[in-house]
Amino acid sequence: MQSVLDDGKKRMAGAIAALEKEFGKLRTGRATTALVDGIVVDYYGTPTPINQLSSVSVPDSKTLTIQPWDKGAFGAVEKAIQTSDLGLNPVNDGKIIRISIPPLTEERRKDLVKVAKKYTEDAKIALRNVRRDMNDMLKKMEKDKDISEDDKKRGESDVQKMTDDFVKKSEEVLGLKEKEILEI
């Protein structure tokens, strides 16, 4: 029974980690390399993540610089950034691509909060799916006579407590991200 709980805890922690990674891609008016992590460049016909064909750095809080290692990739990188849904405008000087991060409008901030809430809801769904899987495993273990009915009830109680803790954690992560987005 402990292995079921340990496995479930690992999977729930993974759901929170995935949520935090998604939040890293949300623009908050501050430059961060995570903004371009999700951008895929068509590099000679092969879809390649931007951070695998260039160095991405943050010289200051409002600027992002991208320096492709291959001079032939500049156009593809620039095009990928422009076609991404980030609303960023890259400036290519032939040596480096600079992206100025404009301040967010109030309307855009509210939209980003909605997106953050959607990501959090997706994480909660993942947590509930893990809870269901764990409870199913406990029921199967009881059916196979590996554990008693009391152990199953105790296990289900532990699973629910763990789920509640991780849901609370997801809400805390959302609260921090919301505060960061709305901060001017």
Image (cartoon, rainbow, N blue to C red):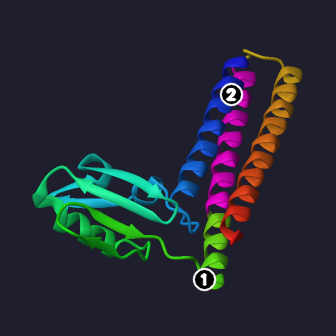
Position of 90 with respect to 68 (left or right) is right
Farthest top residue in view: 146
**What mark, if any, has residue 144 been given in the picture?**
none
Query: Which residue bears the numbered disc 2?
Result: 140
Q: Give the quarter of the figure containing the C terminus.
A: bottom right
Q: Which residue is at 68% across, 27% downward?
A: 140
Was residue 134 drawn as part of the magenta stretch in this picture?
yes
Instruction: Name which residue lies at 56% across and 76% down.
Output: 103
80 on left or right of 46: right
Between 116 and 109, the one lying in front of the other is 109
Decide: is 13 above or below 169.
above
Q: Amino acid at mark 2?
A: Lys
**Residue drawn at (61%, 69%) of the image:** 115
Whether residue 10 is situated above or below residue 77 in the rendered picture: above
Q: Quadrant of the N terminus?
A: top right
Q: What is the three-letter code of the residue carrying label 1?
A: Thr
Q: Going from the N terminus, do you reach mark 1 or mark 2 first?
A: 1
Q: Which region is colored magenta? A: 119-144
Q: Is residue 53 above or below residue 111?
A: above
Q: Does any portion of residue 1 appear in the rendered image?
A: no
Is the stretch drawn in magenta largely helix, strand or loop? helix
Q: What separation in Å lies between label 1 and label 2 (alpha carbons)?
A: 53 Å
Where does label 1 land, which residue? 105
The local crowd at label 2, few if under 14, some if 14 to 19, many if 20 or more residues have their Cα within 10 Å, is: some
